[in-house]
Image (tube, helix red, strand yellow):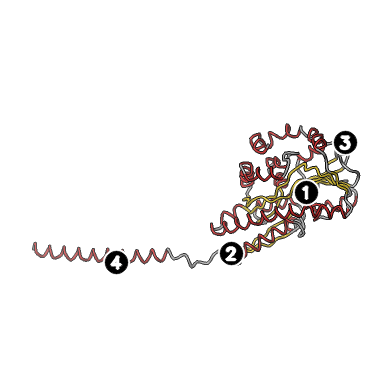
Amino acid sequence: MKKLFMMFLMVALSIALVACGGNDETGGEDSQDTGSTGDEEKESYDLKMSVTVGNSSTWFIAAEKLAEDVAEASDGRIQISVFPNEQLSGGDSGAGVEQVMNGTTDMSYHSTIIYSIMDERLGVLSAPFLFANLEETDVALAGEGGEAIKEIIRENGVETLGFGQNGFRQLTNSKQPVQSPEDLKNLKVRIPGISMYTDLWREFGADPTAMTFSEVFTALQQGTIDGQENPIDVIHSAQLAEVQKYITMWNYSYDPLILGINKELFDSMSEEDQEILRNAAADANAYQIQMARDKEAEQIEELKAAGMEFYEPTEADIEAFRQVVEPIYEKYESVWGADLLNTFR
């Protein structure tokens, strides 16, 4: 009986060992099957990108470069269609930013001024006479201040793929040369629709009117407004020399661009596709900035040839303008945040 029991035990152990060996083999085969993801089809995208200004602007040209580079790097999987002149938002740049935030539009080049309509903290970049030159803006946006701006924009549903340059904003008008604060009295000036600009221009004694940019040319042509303020590239690409005589080159407010993509969309992409977009965006932004700076001198000469009269303020002139609007800092420090303002100031 004992001998029979021992034979039974040996048979049972043999069966168990065979079973264990079968599980090991099956497990190996299962692991190989679940790991075979290399041949899976990668996601394809047809993205829509909005640009505020026309197709002769550096914004649009850089956006087209972005689209070409992304298509090439992704072997055509990621296509970006670029729409100028706020075609996707019916000419309303504020609505254009909202569309990127909610994902109706996938990407855009928009000024931080327009973003500040949605979040007033971003208005700090537009503070009057905050930066003396482009070198200062480059350092500020590449450092702690730029990272703080990206985080604010991220909180509003947009991932920043870097900064472009709209540039320093200059004043044009059809009435008279503006050489001192007194020349601004009662001048009807179109401004973007943010409260800080409204208060700023009222400090000057002007009559500010908020208006989307797509309406500006007609309003100037009809005399509804006397002037407007924008960087040279926008003044040139919008052909404002046809309806404006005078321009004051006072660099009173800097205007960076945000190359933004809807954050939910970006977060859903693979790391590979995110890297493709980041690399192409870095190249597009650098291209746009360099093109804007290279073209400005040529654009100024073309505006002069079209009949515009330029005034270059002296340091004393600039100081006189700066003193008038100093109360803006006192009023808006709490809106922008003292820490954020000091980061730039």
Which is more N-terminal, label 1 or label 4? 4
Labelled disc at residue 231? 1
Residue type, numbered disc 4? Gly
Place of residue 162 in the rendered image (x, y in percent of width and height, measured from the top left): 64, 51
Residue type, numbered disc 1? Pro
Which is more N-terminal, label 1 or label 3? 3
Place of residue 312 in the rendered image (x, y in percent of width and height, measured from the top left): 83, 43
Quarter of the figure that contains the N terminus? bottom left
Q: CA distance from mark 1 to mark 2?
A: 34 Å
Q: Secondary structure at mark 1?
A: loop
The part of the image, by quadrant, that contains residue 88 is bottom right
Q: Which residue is mark 4?
A: 22
Q: Which residue is mark 2?
A: 74
Q: Nearer the viewer, mark 1 or mark 2?
A: 1
Q: Is residue 77 left or right of residue 239?
A: left
Place of residue 120 in the rendered image (x, y in percent of width and height, measured from the top left): 70, 41
